[in-house]
């Protein structure tokens, strides 16, 4: 059965097109920045395909069909029912929903086009077009030729365009569609806005003929004085020297790849200052292979569990966290810039957090780097959410590909300490097998981090004040994490003191969600729902309730900021927003924010 899934995964990936492996650190390779205004055509009926709907497309039979060709009429009599030049513009990176009121609820296809000239920096170099993310499916064309397809709305991808790019007037066309479907990841039902578009950076990259495709360097918990990993060089077919340099630690070590271009590496970290939230020390690390040189700023630290404790650099830590969607509440759209990230992470720091759960999908690449700089630990997650198609091999392959792309992108970031497999999924045999295979994949790709998933809580039919965590997945993960909403979706805050929690696992417990809605500025007594006072009282009574769980080692309450959700339509209060944020959609802090801030301040004092 496992071999069947491997075969399906390989075939599924092949269908994505000629996507080259991810450039994990595109910044030093950037040649042309393609962010900014793109011409767009909204295409709900997929007219841009015309006869291209059935692959393979016979361009000889239909030489003038399709928006991807970006044609102009050759005569004044030729009928051509599209024109990018006269079409509307959308900004990239950004979602289309928040840019044009007509597209606010739109789920369908939009064709993007950007023209550019290209002059190579060095003859013989390879050229790639890189996308930080496109929600949900992207098909990419250069000068009328299809480069390939990518599925998954939150992870990066690229295509090699060496020999395909012209000195002038290149036309890059991308069809992006964000329709929801049962077999997709996430599936039809979510509790966040389905933002469509090119929501991350787009750029042209250059590399030497032989280039460093991937690198990984981090400490294992058993040996904080050594960093180990690998370097993968693409474009070589014989052993090739690779250098790793960390000037501040006097590291300059040489290794040799095997014939496939992979070199296992291990370097001593004598005198290293390990990365912590209080002192987020980073080092300049360079990887050199022939003419290619990649530099990255990296922190080194260890993370592990021992019994019911979480150990950062060998010392117990309590994860003072908060959950976060990838939104800027002041703009009401997808967060897509480093400035957006600094805004929300700054609020988390002010709250007293040392930990942030990035829910429920991979956030932009700048988030992990900015968190590493600011001293915030991260939980990163893939959108295996609620009830997806557990028995569908294509669905698993999709989820596995998204998990792989996330780990490959962020496994060098010291900020990231948890890979999460899923959120609020029901306990079923097919689900258990699905998630266990995800866990095994994550451990193969990165053995240095913790694995978790946000699990469900079950009530005791005989006693409404008993909650039970009984999930076979708990045996496979490092952290027992679960979402609980006592006082909001069940019972009232006054029931919190009577609650009993049965957590039969001797592992660290991290509460991945709790909370309740409040409209910022709406006031009343503590029993009136949606008031700040109700939310404040819920936090006041929930925190001591959870503190009674002996294994409690952290929490990420739901959520830092209000965020848009089409499931939340209570007029005058929700109006399309989930109001569980501690900060409102106007950027103002609610009363519960200060309750949690005080709780975290006391936690800091306790651990001194």
Image: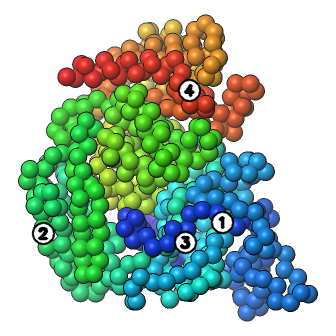
Q: Is residue 3 visible?
A: no
Front: mark 4 or 2: 4
Q: Nearer the viewer, residue 346 or 182?
A: 346
Closer to viewer: mark 3 or mark 2 = 2
Residue 213 at x, y = what percent?
34, 72
Measured Cα–Cα span from mark 3 to mark 2: 38 Å
Q: Which residue is mark 3?
A: 16
Residue found 42% across the figure and 21% down from its top = 596
| Dot 4: element | loop
Look at the numbered disc 2 and give the secondary structure of its residue: strand
The answer to whether the residue labelled 3 contacts the one labelled 2, judged by CB atoms less than 8 Å apart, is no
Q: Counting other residues with Cα less than 10 Å from the Cα at mark 2, is it few (<14), some (14-19), or many (20 or more)?
A: some
The mark nearer the N terminus, 3 or 1, is 3
Question: Disc 4, disc 1: CB below 8 Å?
Answer: no
Query: Residue 183, percent across and down?
Result: 61, 56
Around disc 4, counting alpha carbons within 10 Å, would you say few (fewer than 14), some (14 to 19), or many (20 or more)? few
Q: In the rendered image, is residue 545 in sight?
A: yes
Q: Which residue is mark 1?
A: 38
Q: Quadrant of residue 2?
A: bottom left
Which residue is identified by label 2? 253
Give the foreground label among 3 and 1: 1
Position of the C terminus, as image quadrant, is top left
Instruction: Give the mark, 4 or 1, whose residue is nearer the N terminus.
Output: 1
Residue situated furthest left in the rendering: 270
* Quarter where residue 288 is shown: bottom left
**Quarter of the figure with the N terminus:** bottom left
Where does label 4 land, which residue? 588
Q: Residues within 10 Å of mark 1 (few under 14, many from 20)?
A: many
Give the residue at x 77% y 86%: 64
**Number of disc labels:** 4
């Amino acid at each position: 059965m496992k071999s069947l899934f491997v075969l399906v995964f390989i075939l599924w990936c092949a269908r994505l097109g000629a996507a080259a492996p991810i450039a994990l650190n595109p910044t030093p390779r950037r040649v042309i920045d393609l962010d900014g205004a793109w011409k767009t055509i909204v295409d709900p009926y997929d007219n841009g395909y015309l006869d291209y709907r059935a692959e393979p497309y016979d361009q000889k039979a239909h030489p003038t069909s399709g928006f991807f060709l970006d044609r102009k009429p050759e005569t004044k009599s030729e009928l051509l029912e599209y024109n990018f030049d006269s079409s509307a513009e959308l900004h990239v990176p950004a979602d289309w929903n928040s840019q044009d009121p007509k597209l606010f609820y739109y789920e369908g296809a939009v064709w993007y086009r950007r023209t550019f000239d290209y002059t190579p920096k060095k003859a013989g170099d390879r050229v790639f077009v890189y996308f930080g993310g496109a929600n949900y499916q992207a098909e990419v064309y250069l000068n009328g030729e299809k480069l390939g397809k990518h599925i998954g709305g939150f992870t990066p991808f690229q295509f090699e365009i060496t020999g395909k790019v012209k000195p002038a007037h290149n036309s890059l066309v991308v069809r992006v569609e964000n329709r929801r479907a049962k077999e997709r990841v996430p599936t039809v039902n979510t509790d966040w806005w389905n933002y469509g578009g090119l929501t991350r950076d787009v750029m042209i990259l250059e590399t030497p003929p032989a280039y460093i495709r991937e690198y990984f360097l981090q400490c294992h918990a058993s040996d904080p004085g050594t960093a180990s990993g690998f370097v993968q060089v693409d474009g070589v077919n014989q052993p090739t020297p690779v250098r790793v340099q960390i000037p501040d630690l006097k590291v300059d070590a040489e290794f040799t790849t095997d014939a496939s271009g992979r070199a296992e590496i291990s370097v001593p970290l004598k005198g290293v200052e390990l990365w912590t939230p209080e002192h987020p020390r980073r080092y300049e690390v360079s990887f050199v292979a022939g003419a290619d040189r990649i530099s990255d700023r990296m922190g080194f630290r260890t993370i592990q569990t021992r019994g019911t404790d979480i150990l950062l650099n060998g010392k117990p830590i309590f994860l003072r966290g908060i959950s976060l969607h990838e939104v800027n509440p002041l703009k009401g759209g997808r967060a897509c810039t480093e400035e957006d990230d600094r805004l929300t992470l700054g609020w988390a720091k002010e709250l007293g957090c040392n930990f942030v759960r990035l829910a429920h999908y991979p956030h932009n690449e700048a988030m992990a780097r900015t968190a590493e700089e600011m001293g915030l630990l991260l939980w990163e997650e893939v959108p295996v959410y609620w009830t997806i198609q557990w028995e569908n091999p294509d669905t698993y392959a999709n989820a596995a590909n998204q998990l792989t792309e996330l780990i490959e992108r962020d496994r060098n970031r010291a900020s990231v300490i948890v890979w999460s497999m899923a959120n609020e999924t029901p306990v079923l045999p097919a689900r258990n097998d699905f998630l266990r295979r995800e866990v095994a994949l994550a451990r193969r790709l990165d053995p240095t981090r913790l694995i978790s998933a946000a699990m469900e809580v079950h009530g005791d039919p005989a006693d409404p004040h008993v909650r039970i965590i009984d999930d076979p997945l708990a045996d496979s993960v490092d952290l027992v994490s679960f979402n609980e909403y006592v006082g909001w979706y069940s019972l009232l805050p006054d029931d919190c003191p009577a609650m009993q929690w049965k957590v039969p696992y001797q592992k660290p417990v991290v509460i991945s969600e709790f909370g309740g809605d409040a409209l910022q500025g709406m006031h009343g007594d503590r029993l009136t729902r949606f008031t700040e006072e109700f939310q404040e009282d819920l936090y006041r009574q929930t925190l001591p309730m959870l503190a009674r769980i002996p294994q409690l080692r952290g929490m990420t309450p739901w959520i830092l900021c209000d965020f848009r959700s089409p499931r939340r339509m209570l007029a005058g209060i929700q109006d399309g927003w989930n109001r569980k944020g501690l900060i409102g959609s106007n950027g103002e802090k609610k009363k519960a924010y200060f309750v949690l801030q005080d709780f975290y301040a006391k936690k800091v004092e306790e651990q001194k």
